[in-house]
C-alpha cells in the first residue's frame, strides 16, 4: 500500500464532525507499523517454506544422483551381457551351421554308399544268377555227356564218339534233344571264351595250342566241361566273397556314418538349446537395457528439471526477499518522514488554536510517568532516557512558552521509529541467521552422516580384512598341521608295514614249522602201536595242533589288522589329497579378497579425510555463525517480544495525553478536519 493511500484511508476513517481520540498522523504511523509487522511475518513464513523446499531439493537431488549412478551401472552391465550373449549366439550359430553341414555331408555319404551298395548287390545278384545257370548247364551237360558216353549203343553215342570238338559234341546233344539250342549256344560261347583265355595264356608263353586240344575223346570233353564248371564255381565263390566283403564294408561305413550323424544331432540339439538360452538371455538383457535406459533418461531429465525448478524457486525467493526488504525500507522511510516532518503541520491542522500551557503540562505528566513505569517494567535504559527527555521538555516549555505536547509527542514518535527500525534490522538479521544456520547445520549433518557412513564402511572393510587374514592364518596353520600329520602318517605306515612284514614272516614260519612237525609225528606214530600213539605222542600232537591253531589265528588277525590299517591309510591319503588343494584355494581366494578390502580401506580413508576436512571447515563456519547470531544477551523471540511490548506501551502513552481537556480552554475551537467535507463528498 502506498503512502498517499494510507493517508487517504486514515483521513476517511474520521467522522465528518467531532473530535477523534487519535490524529490521522498517529493512525497512519500505526498502520505503517502494522504493515511492517505483516511484511516481516510473511518474510519469516516464506523463509520457513523456502528452507523446507531447499532441503527437499537437496535430498531429491542426492537421491536422483544415486539412482542415476545405479542406472548407469545397470546399463553398462546390460550392455556387457548383450555383447557376451551376442558373441555366444554367433559362435553357436556358426557351430550349428558347421554341424548341419557335417550332418548333410554324412547323410549324402550314406545315400551315396547305399546307392553303390544297391548297385553292387544288383550286379552280384545278376552275376550269381548267371553263374548258377552256367554251372547248372555245365553240370547237366557233363552229366548227360557222361551218361551218353557210358551207353553201349545208340545214334547219339555214335555222334558223340565221332565229334571232334566240344562244339560238335554239344551240337550232337542238341540234335539228340538232350540240350536246348540256347543252352548249347551259351556253353559254346563259354568254351570259346575259355579257349580264348587259354590261348592267350599259351601264346604269352609258348605260342598257340594245337588243334587237337578239344579233339577226340569223351574223357577230354567231360574233363573240359568239369574244368569249366570248377572255374564257374570258383568265379561264383569269388563273387560271393567279394559281395560279403562289400556288404561288410558298407555296413561298417553306414554304422560309422550313422553314429556320426547321431552324435552330430545330439550336439546340434545341445547347441540349439544353448542358442535358445543365449537368445533368451539376450532378449532379457535387451529388455532390461531398454527399461534401464528409459529409467536413466527419466532420472537425468528429472534431475535437470529439478535443478531448474529449484534454481527458479531460489531466484523467486531472493526476488521476494529483496522486494520485502525494499518494501520495509520504503515503509520505514515513509514513517520516518511522517514522524519527522508532520509534527507542526499536524498541530496546526488538527490541534488547538490556543492551548493552556498549564493544562498541557499537567496532561503530559501522566505520559512521563507511564513511560517511566514502562522503562522499569522492561528494564529498558532507552525508555528511561526517553522519560527523562520528556520531563525535561515539559519543564523547558513552561518557561519558554513552547508547546510541550508537540515536543513530547515528537520524542515518543522518534522512539517508536527507532524501536521499529531496530525491530526491522533485527528481523532481517534473524532471517539471515536462520537461513545460514539451517543450511550450514544441514550441510554439517550431511557431512557428519557421510563421515559416519565412511567410517562404518572402513570399519567393516577392516573387520572383514582382519577376519579373512585370521582365516588365512588358520588355514595355513591347518595346512602346516596337515602336512605334519601326513608325514607322521606316512612314517607310521612304513613302521607298521615293516612290523607286519617281520611279524607275519615269523608267524608264517612258525605255522610252517608246526605243520612240518605235525606231519612228521603223525606219519611216525601212524606206523607204531596204538598204545604208543595214545601216550606222549598224542599229547604232543594235540599240543602242536593247538599251537598251529593259535599261530594261524594270530596270522589271520595280524593280516586283518594290516589290511584295515592299509585301508585307513589310503582313505586318509585320499581325503588329504582333497582337503589340501581345497584349503590352498581358500587361502588364495581369501588372501586376494583381503587385499581387495585393504585397497578399499585405503580408498575410503582418502574419502574420509576429504570429508573430515570439509566437515571441520563447515563446523568452524557454523561456530562463527552461532557466535554472531546466537551468542547474545537474550534470544531473538525475547528481544522481539520486549520490543513489541515497548512499542505498544509508547503507543498507549501517546493516548494518555488528554487532547480533549486542552480543547476545553481553547477560545476558538475547530471540531472538524479541514477538507473533511470535501473528502466525504469525494468518497
Image (cartoon, rainbow, N blue to C red):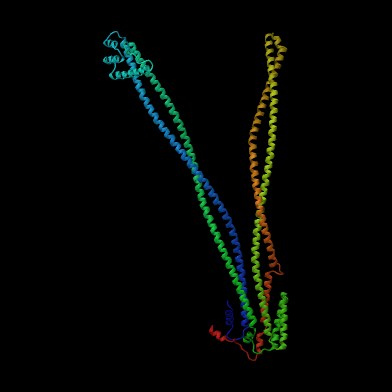
Q: Position of residue 171 (x, y in %)?
A: 28, 15
In the image, residue 357 above or below residue 68: below
Looking at the image, which is closer to me, 672 or 386? Answer: 386
Query: Dividing the picture into quarters, in which one does residue 677 lie?
Result: bottom right
Q: Position of residue 72 (x, y in %)?
A: 56, 53
Q: Is residue 291 left or right of residue 148?
A: right
Q: Is residue 5 left or right of residue 139?
A: right
Q: Quadrant of the N terminus?
A: bottom right
Looking at the image, which is closer to me, 492 or 128? Answer: 128
Q: Position of residue 319 (x, y in %)?
A: 58, 69
In the image, residue 555 above or below residue 621: above
Q: Quadrant of the C terminus?
A: bottom right
Q: Is residue 498 visible?
A: yes
In the image, residue 518 above or below residue 53: above
Q: Residue at x 62, y 80 (%)?
A: 27
Q: Is residue 652 visible?
A: no
Count the numbered circles shown.
Answer: 0
Q: Residue at x 53, y 84 (%)?
A: 682
Q: Is residue 88 left or right of residue 427?
A: left
In the image, residue 466 above or below residue 251: below
Q: Position of residue 462 (x, y in %)?
A: 67, 49
Amino acid at each position: 500500500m502506498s503512502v498517499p493511500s494510507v493517508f487517504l484511508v486514515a483521513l476517511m476513517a474520521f467522522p465528518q464532525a467531532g473530535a477523534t481520540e487519535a490524529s490521522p498522523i498517529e493512525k497512519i504511523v500505526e498502520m505503517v507499523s502494522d504493515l511492517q509487522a505483516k511484511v516481516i511475518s510473511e518474510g519469516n513464513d516464506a523463509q520457513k517454506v523456502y528452507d523446507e523446499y531447499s532441503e527437499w531439493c537437496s535430498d531429491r537431488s542426492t537421491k536422483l544422483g544415486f539412482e542415476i549412478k545405479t542406472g548407469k551401472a545397470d546399463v553398462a552391465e546390460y550392455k556387457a551381457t548383450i555383447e557376451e550373449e551376442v558373441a555366444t549366439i554367433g559362435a553357436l550359430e556358426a557351430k550349428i551351421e558347421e554341424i548341419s553341414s557335417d550332418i548333410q555331408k554324412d547323410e549324402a555319404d550314406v545315400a551315396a554308399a547305399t546307392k553303390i551298395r544297391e548297385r553292387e548287390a544288383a550286379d552280384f545278384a545278376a552275376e550269381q544268377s548267371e553263374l548258377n545257370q552256367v554251372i547248372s548247364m555245365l553240370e547237366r551237360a557233363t552229366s548227360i555227356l557222361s551218361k551218353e558216353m557210358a551207353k553201349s549203343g545208340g545214334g547219339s553215342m555214335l555222334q558223340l564218339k565221332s565229334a571232334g570238338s566240344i562244339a560238335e559234341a554239344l551240337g550232337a546233344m542238341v540234335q539228340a534233344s538232350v540240350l536246348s539250342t540256347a543252352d548249347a549256344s551259351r556253353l559254346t560261347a563259354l568254351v570259346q571264351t575259355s579257349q580264348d583265355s587259354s590261348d592267350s595264356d599259351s601264346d604269352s608263353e609258348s605260342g598257340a595250342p594245337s588243334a587237337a586240344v578239344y579233339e577226340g575223346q569223351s574223357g577230354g570233353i567231360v574233363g573240359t566241361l568239369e574244368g569249366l564248371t570248377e572255374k564257374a564255381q570258383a568265379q561264383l565263390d569269388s563273387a560271393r566273397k567279394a559281395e560279403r566283403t562289400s556288404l561288410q564294408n558298407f555296413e561298417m561305413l553306414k554304422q560309422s556314418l550313422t553314429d556320426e550323424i547321431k552324435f552330430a544331432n545330439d550336439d546340434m540339439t545341445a547347441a540349439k538349446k544353448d542358442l535358445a538360452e543365449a537368445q533368451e538371455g539376450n532378449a532379457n538383457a535387451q529388455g532390461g537395457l531398454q527399461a534401464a535406459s528409459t529409467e536413466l533418461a527419466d532420472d537425468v531429465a528429472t534431475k535437470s528439471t529439478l535443478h531448474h525448478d529449484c534454481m527458479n524457486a531460489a531466484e523467486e525467493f531472493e526476488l521476494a526477499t529483496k522486494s520485502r526488504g525494499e518494501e520495509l525500507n520504503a515503509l520505514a522511510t515513509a514513517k520516518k518522514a511522517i514522524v519527522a516532518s508532520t509534527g507542526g503541520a499536524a498541530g496546526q491542522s488538527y490541534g488547538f488554536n490556543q492551548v493552556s500551557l498549564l493544562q498541557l503540562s499537567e496532561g503530559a505528566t501522566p505520559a512521563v510517568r507511564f513511560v517511566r513505569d514502562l522503562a522499569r517494567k522492561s528494564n529498558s535504559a532507552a525508555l528511561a532516557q526517553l522519560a527523562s527527555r520528556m520531563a525535561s521538555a515539559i519543564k523547558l516549555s513552561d518557561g519558554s512558552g513552547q508547546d510541550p505536547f508537540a515536543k513530547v509527542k515528537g520524542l515518543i514518535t522518534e522512539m517508536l521509529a527507532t524501536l521499529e527500525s531496530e525491530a526491522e534490522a533485527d528481523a532481517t538479521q534473524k532471517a539471515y541467521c536462520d537461513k545460514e544456520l539451517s543450511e550450514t547445520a544441514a550441510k554439517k549433518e550431511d557431512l557428519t552422516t557421510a563421515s559416519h557412513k565412511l567410517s562404518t564402511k572402513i570399519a567393516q572393510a577392516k573387520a572383514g580384512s582382519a577376519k579373512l587374514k585370521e582365516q588365512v592364518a588358520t588355514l595355513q596353520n591347518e595346512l602346516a598341521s596337515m602336512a605334519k600329520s601326513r608325514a607322521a602318517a606316512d612314517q607310521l605306515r612304513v613302521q607298521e608295514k615293516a612290523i607286519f612284514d617281520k611279524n607275519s614272516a615269523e608267524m608264517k614260519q612258525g605255522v610252517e614249522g608246526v605243520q612240518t612237525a605235525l606231519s612228521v609225528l603223525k606219519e611216525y606214530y601212524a606206523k607204531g602201536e596204538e598204545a604208543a600213539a595214545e601216550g606222549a605222542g598224542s599229547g604232543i600232537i594235540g599240543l602242536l595242533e593247538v599251537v598251529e591253531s593259535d599261530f594261524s589265528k594270530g596270522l589271520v588277525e595280524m593280516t586283518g589288522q594290516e589290511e584295515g590299517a592299509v585301508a585307513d591309510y589310503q582313505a586318509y591319503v585320499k581325503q588329504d589329497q582333497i582337503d589340501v588343494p581345497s584349503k590352498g584355494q581358500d587361502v588364495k581366494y581369501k588372501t586376494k579378497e583381503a587385499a581387495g578390502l585393504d585397497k578399499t580401506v585405503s580408498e575410503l580413508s582418502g574419502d574420509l579425510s576429504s570429508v573430515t576436512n570439509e566437515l571441520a571447515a563447515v563446523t568452524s563456519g557454523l561456530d562463527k555463525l552461532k557466535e554472531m547470531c546466537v551468542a547474545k544477551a537474550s534470544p531473538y523471540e525475547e528481544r522481539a517480544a520486549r520490543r513489541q511490548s515497548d512499542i505498544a506501551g509508547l503507543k498507549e502513552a501517546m493516548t494518555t495525553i488528554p487532547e480533549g481537556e486542552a480543547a476545553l480552554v481553547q477560545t476558538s475551537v475547530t471540531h472538524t478536519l479541514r477538507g473533511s467535507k470535501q473528502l466525504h463528498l469525494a468518497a
